[in-house]
Image (cartoon, rainbow, N blue to C red):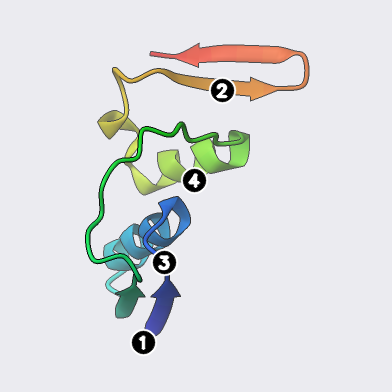
Amino acid sequence: MIIINGAGIAGLTLANALQLKNIDFMLIEKSEHLHAIGAGILLQNNGLAILECLGVTQFIKGFAVSQMSMGFHKHIN
């Protein structure tokens, strides 16, 4: 069993990946309730590639998502 400390973006992404692979895990979060705080999330190109591999990019389509690197900016529809 894998123990994940924190239900932030990294912890939830790892939990999703483990669940897709049928690997047992336990997610530990100190907050009693999960809620949106209105903050933006910045993902580098590798992070977007991981979401694509996990097959979850269709769930973020329609939101303001941009891919950026040095001297390059691509808006994802």
Is 59 located above or below residue 8 in the figure? above
Question: Alpha-carbon neighbours of circle 2 within 10 Å: few (<14), some, or many (≥20)?
Answer: some
Residue at 42% over, 61% down: 11
In the rendered structure, are the residues bearing label 2 and label 1 in contact, judged by CB atoms less than 8 Å apart? Answer: no
Position of 61 with respect to 10 (left or right) is left
Please tell me in which quadrant of the rendered image residue 39 appears.
Answer: top left
Is 53 located above or below residue 7 in the figure? above
In the rendered structure, are the residues bearing label 3 and label 4 in contact, judged by CB atoms less than 8 Å apart? Answer: no
User: Which callout, 3 or 1, points to the residue nearer the camera?
Assistant: 3
Q: Nearer the viewer, residue 65 or 41?
A: 41
In the image, what residue type sits under mark 3? Gly
Q: Residue furthest bottom?
A: 1
The residue that disc 4 covers is 50
In the image, what residue type sits under mark 2? Gln
Question: Alpha-carbon neighbours of circle 3 within 10 Å: few (<14), some, or many (≥20)?
Answer: some
Q: Nearer the viewer, residue 35 or 13?
A: 35
N-terminal of the two: label 2 or label 4?
Answer: 4
Residue at 63% over, 22% down: 68
> Which quadrant would the C terminus be assigned to in this image?
top left
- Kindly report the distance in space between the C-alpha atoms of the residues bearing marks 2 and 3: 26 Å
The residue that disc 2 covers is 67
The residue that disc 3 covers is 6
In the image, what residue type sits under mark 4? Ile
Residue at 34% over, 64% down: 15
The residue that disc 1 covers is 1
Question: Alpha-carbon neighbours of circle 1 within 10 Å: few (<14), some, or many (≥20)?
Answer: few
N-terminal of the two: label 3 or label 1?
Answer: 1
Callout 3: helix, strand or loop?
loop
Question: Alpha-carbon neighbours of circle 4 within 10 Å: few (<14), some, or many (≥20)?
Answer: some
In the image, what residue type sits under mark 1? Met
Callout 2: helix, strand or loop?
strand
